[in-house]
Image (tube, rainbow, N blue to C red):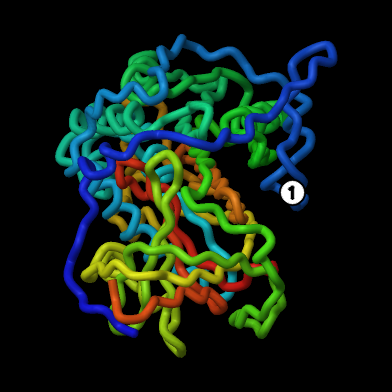
């Protein structure tokens, strides 16, 4: 059945009323064999996303001490308007990434990780380059970005006996770069970014960066980042999220069935659940959501038969309407959802350019806030991990921005969320900030 459409937005204050309770985030245990060693969380595919070698190196010592805020301070400093700006950045950038990458692949993209990586870059830019970054991030000034991004950081993070959401920023500086201490101090004070000074052309530096990512994503990501002689500075952000469903799926009800993937039918395990909650129906899709113990939620969008998921995120406005529009109706919801786990790696320069950031990638780049040496952004890469099962959802992301010298280049009947064909999803935190957004084309991959 269908439901009426009307624009609707969850407000930040509504989510603040939801307290934090139940399920321990799986914190990895350390083994003490001579020195601290973080053990991998679970087996991953080989390749750049996960390298066992990353666990054999120690993290370096930061240049300046960062005074990290305590998780769940409850100060509620961030404004709802800024959360909306972060989310609009998320939908605009997701439209580019999902339509480019998601025709047949599974995609899990973290707008928040990309946002914070660019936020750390912004104080290092000046002139037209900085203005393009600020415009892409939907803020009016560098001061607004520093204040509100710092406030969102403080309000969003939590780490308690029931779950965890962490955000981490770092700046890796080559020992040949004459960097400005004012930049290092500013990003440490406003965005809690650690800075490290070492030979970025060495293989060891790539391993140390991978170790830093592993330390900040509970071992779910441990990439061996590529290094090259021209690399002068690398900005890395990580986002780690883990929480339990408020209403978990009964494992006894999980059974194999057919998922109609874009490449053909596959047999996968489906979880089953009946809830009473919000659904939004529109011409082309049905949307439902499941809540987490710590106040966040995961939204699922099931396209109608014959409707491509990509048509529902073809641009930023369409994606916003798909995930936020429509009139909600409370009704019984019958859920049938595949268990799925997948990793992603993709480049983000095209998405940044689509958002209006152009000069940063050319010889006209103005990164004089970082150094008087002529520099430009040579590469932006994001790695992500996602796991969904009966009890919980775990998602992590790492975004790296590489910088090189310019010379180098209630209804009458229930709603049925039968997710047995490609579908969209999004994960929000308790403040309503968009953490992850993606598409599941084939849960068997």
Q: Position of residue 195 (x, y in %)?
A: 49, 20
* Number of numbered labels in the structure image: 1
* Residue 35 shows in the view: yes
Q: Where's the C terminus, which quadrant? A: bottom right
Q: Residue at image x 45%, y 90%? A: 306
Q: In the picture provided, is 64 more to the left or to the right than 85?
A: right
Question: Could you say which is closer to the camera, residue 296 or residue 111?
Answer: 296
Q: Position of residue 296 (x, y in %)?
A: 39, 46
Q: Residues within 10 Å of mark 1 (few under 14, many from 20)?
A: some
Q: Position of residue 244 (x, y in %)?
A: 53, 45
Which residue bears the numbered disc 1? Answer: 44
Q: Residue at image x 48%, y 55%? A: 109
Question: Could you say which is closer to the camera, residue 309 or residue 128?
Answer: 309
Task: Name the quadrant containing residue 329.
Answer: bottom left
Q: In the picture provided, is 198 more to the left or to the right than 102?
A: right
Q: Residue at image x 46%, y 9%? A: 65
33 w.r.t. 133: above or below: above
Question: Could you say which is closer to the camera, residue 201 or residue 315?
Answer: 315
Task: Name the quadrant containing residue 426.
Answer: bottom left
Q: Residue lying farthest right?
A: 33
Question: Could you say which is closer to the camera, residue 159 or residue 255?
Answer: 255
Q: Position of residue 105 (x, y in %)?
A: 59, 69
Q: Residue lying farthest bottom?
A: 306
* Residue 362 shows in the view: no
In terms of secondary structure, where does tag 1 sit?
loop
Q: In the picture provided, is 389 more to the left or to the right than 22?
A: right
Q: Where's the N terminus, which quadrant? A: bottom left
Q: Residue at image x 77%, y 50%? A: 46
430 w.r.t. 33: above or below: below
């Amino acid at each position: 059945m269908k439901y009426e459409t009307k624009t609707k937005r969850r407000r930040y204050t509504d989510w603040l009323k939801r307290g934090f309770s139940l399920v321990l985030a799986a914190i990895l245990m350390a083994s003490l064999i001579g020195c601290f060693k973080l053990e991998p969380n679970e087996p991953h595919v080989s390749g750049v996303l996960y390298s066992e070698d990353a666990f054999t190196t120690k993290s370096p010592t930061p240049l300046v001490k960062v005074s990290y805020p305590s998780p769940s301070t409850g100060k509620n400093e961030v404004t709802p308007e800024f959360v909306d700006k972060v989310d609009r950045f998320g939908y605009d950038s997701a439209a580019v990434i999902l339509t480019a990458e998601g025709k047949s692949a599974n995609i899990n993209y973290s707008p928040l990780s990309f946002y914070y990586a660019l936020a750390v870059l912004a104080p290092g830019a000046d002139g037209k380059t900085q203005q393009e970054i600020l415009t892409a991030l939907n803020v009016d000034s560098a001061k607004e970005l520093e204040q509100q991004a710092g406030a969102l950081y403080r309000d969003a993070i939590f780490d308690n006996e029931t779950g965890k959401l962490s955000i981490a920023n770092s700046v890796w500086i080559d020992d040949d770069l004459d960097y400005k201490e004012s930049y290092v101090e500013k990003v440490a004070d406003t965005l809690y970014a650690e800075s490290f000074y070492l030979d970025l052309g060495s293989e060891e530096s790539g391993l140390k960066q991978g170790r830093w990512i592993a330390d900040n994503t509970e071992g779910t990501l441990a990439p061996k980042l590529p290094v090259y002689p021209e690399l002068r500075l690398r900005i890395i952000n990580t986002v780690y999220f883990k929480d339990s469903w408020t209403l978990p799926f009964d494992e006894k009800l999980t059974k194999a069935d057919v998922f109609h993937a874009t490449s053909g039918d596959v047999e996968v395990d489906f979880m089953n659940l009946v809830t009473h909650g919000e659904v939004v129906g529109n011409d082309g899709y049905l949307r439902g959501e499941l809540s987490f113990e710590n106040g966040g939620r995961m939204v699922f969008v099931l396209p109608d038969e014959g409707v491509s998921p990509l048509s529902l995120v073809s641009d930023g406005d369409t994606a916003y309407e798909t995930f936020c529009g429509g009139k909600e109706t409370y009704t019984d919801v019958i859920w049938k959802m595949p268990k799925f786990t997948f990793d992603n790696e993709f480049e983000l320069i095209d998405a940044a350019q689509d958002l209006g950031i152009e000069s940063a990638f050319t010889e006209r780049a103005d990164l004089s806030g970082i150094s008087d040496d002529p520099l430009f952004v040579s590469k932006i890469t994001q790695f992500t991990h996602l796991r969904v099962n009966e009890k919980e959802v775990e998602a992590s992301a790492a975004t790296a921005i590489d910088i090189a010298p310019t010379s180098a280049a209630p209804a009458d009947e229930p709603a049925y969320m039968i997710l047995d064909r490609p579908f969209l999803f999004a994960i929000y935190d308790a403040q309503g900030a968009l953490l992850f957004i993606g598409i599941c084309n084939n849960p068997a991959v």
